[in-house]
Image: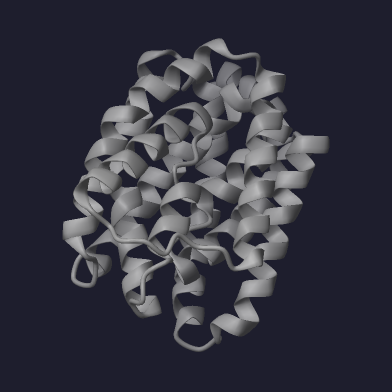
């Protein structure tokens, strides 16, 4: 017991864990409000704090729990015709993407994650969206790209978010589609890090601290969705994305 406490203390007393708690609380509110935000905030922040191979598995495990938490209510609103092909292709692409997580230099991967989030945030701010149709072939292609990104960086969201938010559906449908998509690949995304030995005692200790933070803040964001107009929430969300991406890229 004492040896466990001795090994846990350096992890729990690390200042970086406090920074991760703050980032996790912000990401939880964003995820509850918009249906996304967990990975695009936490992947760059956790990678900056602990490195991609240590930070991404924590985020993936948290994403799995959050997806299970939000999925039941979203299933009634989601467009399965679009989301299921996206999720299926992403699930197949995720293990291939994980190969990059194991082989690419951690510093290079961290900066790629930061740059990718920064570009994604700028695209959202510009108002650009995909405005074409959604044939099955394109659904599968977008899903495959998202899966590759999920396995390598922990982030499947950016291409799917830009793709799905292009539609004319109301915000409730957009949110449900995103929640269902993320849930569809959450289980697959944690298998490779588990089998590859990236999930150890340190990962589980960090998860034990951060998961309750996420669990408490997601419902807060869900409640805010019903009372805070998007026009007020959007500038805050975009600012958080740009800050997270910039820190990981230039930090």
Placement of 56 over or under 158, stated as above or below: above
**Residue at x 68% of width, y 42% of height:** 45
**Residue 251 in sight in this render:** no
Residue at the front extreme, as displayed = 132
Image position, residue 178 (x, y; %):
36, 59
In the image: residue 10, left or right of residue 60? right
* Way the structure is coloured: one colour
Front residue of this view, candidates 214 and 182: 182
Figure quadrant of the C terminus: top right
**Residue 250 in sight in this render:** yes
In the image: residue 177, left or right of residue 118? left
Q: How many marks?
A: 0
Image position, residue 145 (x, y; %):
40, 36
Placement of 95 over or under 67, stated as above or below: above
Front residue of this view, candidates 117 and 202: 117
**Residue at x 44% of width, y 13% of height:** 197
**Residue at x 45% of width, y 59% of height:** 130
Image position, residue 218 (x, y; %):
47, 64
Residue 245 occupies which quadrant of the picture? top right
Front residue of this view, candidates 216 and 74: 74
**Residue at x 68% of width, y 70% of height:** 236
Image position, residue 33 (x, y; %):
48, 71
Residue at the right extreme, as displayed = 251
């Amino acid at each position: 017991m004492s040896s466990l406490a001795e090994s846990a203390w350096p992890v729990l007393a690390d200042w970086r864990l406090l920074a991760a708690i703050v980032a996790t609380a912000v990401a939880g509110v964003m995820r509850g409000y918009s249906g996304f935000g967990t990975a695009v905030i936490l992947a760059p922040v956790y990678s900056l704090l602990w490195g991609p191979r240590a930070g991404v598995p924590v985020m993936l495990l948290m994403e799995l729990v959050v997806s299970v938490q939000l999925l039941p209510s979203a299933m009634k609103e989601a467009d399965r015709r679009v989301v299921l092909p996206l999720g299926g292709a992403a699930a197949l692409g995720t293990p291939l993407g994980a190969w990059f997580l194991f082989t690419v230099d951690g510093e290079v991967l961290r900066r790629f994650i930061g740059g990718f989030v920064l570009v994604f945030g700028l695209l959202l701010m510009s108002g650009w969206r995909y405005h074409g149709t959604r044939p099955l072939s394109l659904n599968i292609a977008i899903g495959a790209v998202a899966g590759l990104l999920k396995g390598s960086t922990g982030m499947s969201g950016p291409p799917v978010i830009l793709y799905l938010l292009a539609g004319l559906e109301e915000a409730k449908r957009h949110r449900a589609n995103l929640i269902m998509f993320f849930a569809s690949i959450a289980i697959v995304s944690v298998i490779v890090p588990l089998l590859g030995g990236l999930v150890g005692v340190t990962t589980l200790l960090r998860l034990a601290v951060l998961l309750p933070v996420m669990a408490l803040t997601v419902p807060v964001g869900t409640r805010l969705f019903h009372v805070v107009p998007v026009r007020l929430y959007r500038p805050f969300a975009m600012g958080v994305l740009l800050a997270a991406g910039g820190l990981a890229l230039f930090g």
